[in-house]
Image (tube, rainbow, N blue to C red):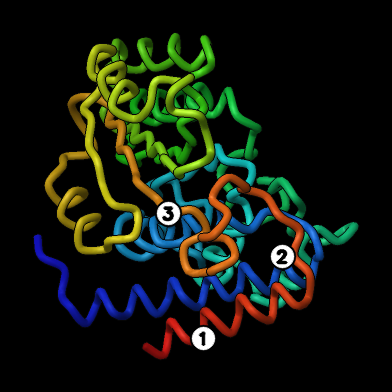
Amino acid sequence: MQMDESRTEELKALASEIRKDIVRMVGVARSGPLEVPLSIADILVFLYWEELLVVAEDPLREDRDRFLLGIENGVPALYAVLARRGYFERDELWHYRRLGAMLQALPDFRRTPGIDAPCITVGPELAVAAALAESLQTDGLAPRVFCLSGEDVFQLHDFHLEAKRSAHAGLGNLILLIVAVPGRINDAVHGGTEEHKKIMREYGWAVLSIDGHSFEEMEDVFSSQEFLCGLPKAVFIDAKNGKGISFVDADPSRYTRSMSMDDMDQALEELEGHINE
C-alpha cells in the first residue's frame, strides 16, 4: 500500500517535533541518552500513529497491541511519543529523571500510562514479550506484541534459546524489531546484520528489513504482512545514529552523551532548520 505524500510529510513534521522534545528533555535534565532516542524516533512515530492499535484515553483496553522497549538508551524517545500521543501532559517531559517525577530513567509500568512492561536492560526482553504474546494467544485475544531491541541481543545465549522456543510455539502475534545503529556494536566481532538475519531464518522466524527513517518503506513492509498468524516476525531496522543533529552524526561511535546547554541550543536550531526545509 502506497502512503499518501501528504501523510508522509505529516509524519516527518511530527517526528521533528518529537526530536525537539527529546533534546529539550535530555538538555533540561542535563543527563540521559540522546543518540539512540533520536535514531529510533521515526520508527516509534510510525508504530504509534500508523500501526499499533492503542487508545490513550483507555490505556488498559484488552484488545490493544502491546509495545515493549528493550533498549534502555531509547527511553526518552518513548516518553516523547507517549506524551504527543496523549497518554500524559507534555509538561511531564521537562521533569524527566527528577526525584519523584513520573518519568524516571527506566519507565515504571505501574505509574506511567502507556507503558506495558518494565524496560529491562539488554537480555530478557524477548522472553517477556514472548510470554505476553503466548498468553494473549491462549486467551483467544487478537493483540499483537511488538518488542524493540538492539542487535547486541545476539551476544546472549538466553536470547537464542527464546528465539527458538518462540518459533516452535508458533507465536505469529510476536514482532521483534531489531535496530541496527552503526557504531553501536562491532559487526566484525558479533557477526553483523546479515548473519543475524540468517540465524533468525534458521530458527523459524519470518525475516523482514526496513529503512528506519523511510515512512513509505515502513508502510509497504507492514501493510504486506499478516501479523496475527504464521511465524513470529523479526524486522531488522537500519537506523542512522542520532539522525538530525550534526555533532551526533559526526561521532557515531558514541551512543550516550550528556548535553551542555550550548549543545541543546545548537541541536534545537538544527532541528528547526530541518523542519522548515
Tell me the residue at 57%/75% (across/down).
20
- What's the mark number on residue 76? none
Q: Nearer the viewer, mark 1 or mark 2?
A: 1
Q: In the structure shown, which secondary structural element does the residue marked by tag 2 occupy?
A: helix
**Which x, y percent locates residue 163?**
39, 17
Check the picture and name the quadrant holding the N terminus: bottom left
- In this rendering, the answer to whether 41 lies above or below 190 is below
Left or right of 145, for residue 255 = right
Q: In the structure shown, which secondary structural element does the residue marked by tag 1 occupy?
A: helix
Check the picture and name the quadrant holding the C terminus: bottom left
Report the front residue among 245 and 165. Answer: 245
**Which x, y percent locates residue 181?**
45, 44
Q: Earlier in the sequence, mark 2 or mark 3?
A: 2
Q: Decide: few, some or many residues near mark 2? Use Cα within 10 Å; few <14, some 14-19, many ≥20.
A: many
Report the front residue among 82 and 34. Answer: 34
Left or right of 66, for residue 89 = right
Label 1, on which residue?
A: 272
- What's the mark number on residue 240? 3
Left or right of 144, for residue 244 = right
Asked whether disc 2 touches disc 3, contact meaning CB atoms under 8 Å apart, the reply is no
Q: Nearer the viewer, mark 2 or mark 3?
A: 3
Numbered-mark total: 3
- In this rendering, the answer to whether 219 lies above or below 263 is above
The amino acid on which the numbered mark 3 sits, given as a three-letter code, is Lys
Q: Earlier in the sequence, mark 1 or mark 2?
A: 2
**Which x, y percent locates residue 189?**
48, 19
The amino acid on which the numbered mark 1 sits, given as a three-letter code, is Glu
Asked whether disc 1 touches disc 2, contact meaning CB atoms under 8 Å apart, the reply is no
The amino acid on which the numbered mark 2 sits, given as a three-letter code, is Val
Give how far apart the Cα atoms at labels 1 and 3 are. 19 Å
Q: Quadrant of residue 193?
A: top left
- What's the mark number on residue 26? 2
